[in-house]
């Protein structure tokens, strides 16, 4: 099936916030949401944002998290249902919201984005798919791979000398990754040293409503 393409800046206007799907443009005065913060469409400026029903709020948050992480409907549904099953089996010793957030954050494409090696998750997926990324020293082409604590991520030496990666080094000199990741900007590599938690992530989506959507 041909992948569905989206207008990333239109998504910011749809959800009423900067989604940072194109970080460099979102940070510039040219950002579509900065210039036109109302909903997209011919009547977006004159139309008020109507209050949503409970189901509408759940659907919106589900769509928001899918767009943020670039995951398919099937993958997100599986993640939520597996997290719910795990928390039930563990007799509530784990919080389903924490498990879901951790699973999404541990994806390889997201880790590359959080480390700063990729400016966006979409570009991170391209890096992985094109064979530029190593996990524990071995090439992988699966962006959805879930990393474990102690695993390392790096750019292939042959790829690191290319212009896009070489330019990232200058950006990374001033970048500080999340506490659950380490980064060596010179080698364009890092390590996952702990599991990510919700408290450490400024997530703009309401994961609880996503759980409610799939638990119906």
Image (cartoon, rainbow, N blue to C red):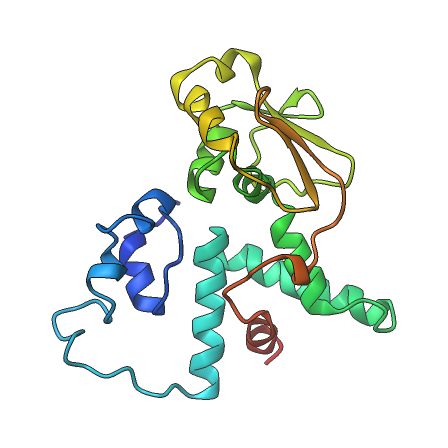
Nearer-the-camera pick, 117 or 146: 117
- Res 110 quadrant in image: top right
Q: Is residue 117 above or below residue 132?
A: below
Nearer-the-camera pick, 24 or 157: 24
Q: In this rendering, would 115 be left or right of 148?
A: left
Let me know if residue 27 appears in the view. yes
Q: In this rendering, would 47 be left or right of 206?
A: left
Q: In this rendering, would 166 be left or right of 197?
A: left
Q: State the image coordinates of residue 37 (x, y, percent, origin top left).
A: 25, 67
Quadrant holding the C terminus: bottom right
Identify the residue shown where x is 66% and y is 62%: 198
In the rendered image, the residue lying farthest to the front is 174
Q: Is residue 131 above or below residue 23?
A: above
Let me know if residue 6 appears in the view. no
Q: State the image coordinates of residue 104 (x, y, percent, origin top left).
A: 61, 53
Identify the residue shown where x is 27% and y is 61%: 33
Quadrant holding the N terminus: top left
Q: State the image coordinates of residue 54 (x, y, percent, origin top left).
A: 48, 87
Identify the residue shown where x is 32% and y is 60%: 11
Identify the residue shown where x is 37% and y is 65%: 17
Q: State the image coordinates of residue 27 (x, y, percent, origin top left).
A: 33, 49
Q: In this rendering, would 196 be left or right of 201?
A: right
Give the total number of marks visible in the rendering: 0
- Res 154 quadrant in image: top right
């Amino acid at each position: 099936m041909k992948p569905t393409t989206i207008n990333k800046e239109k998504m910011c206007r749809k959800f009423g916030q900067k989604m940072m799907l194109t970080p460099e443009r979102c940070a510039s005065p040219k950002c579509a949401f900065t210039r036109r913060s109302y909903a997209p469409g011919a009547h977006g400026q004159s139309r008020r944002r109507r209050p949503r029903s409970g189901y509408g709020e759940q659907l919106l948050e589900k769509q928001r998290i899918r767009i943020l992480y670039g995951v398919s409907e099937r993958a997100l549904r599986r993640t939520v249902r597996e997290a719910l099953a795990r928390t039930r089996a563990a007799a509530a010793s784990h919080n389903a919201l924490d498990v879901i957030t951790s699973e999404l954050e541990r994806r390889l494409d997201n880790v590359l984005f959080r480390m700063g090696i990729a400016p966006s998750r979409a570009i991170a997926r391209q890096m992985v798919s094109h064979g530029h990324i190593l996990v524990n020293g071995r090439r992988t082409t699966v962006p959805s791979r879930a990393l474990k604590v102690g695993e390392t991520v790096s750019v292939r030496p042959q790829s690191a000398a290319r212009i896009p990666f070489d330019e990232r080094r200058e950006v990374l000199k001033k970048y500080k990754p999340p506490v659950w990741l380490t980064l060596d900007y010179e080698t364009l590599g890092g390590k996952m040293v702990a599991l990510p938690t919700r408290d450490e992530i400024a997530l703009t989506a309401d994961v609880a409503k996503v759980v409610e959507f799939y638990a119906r």
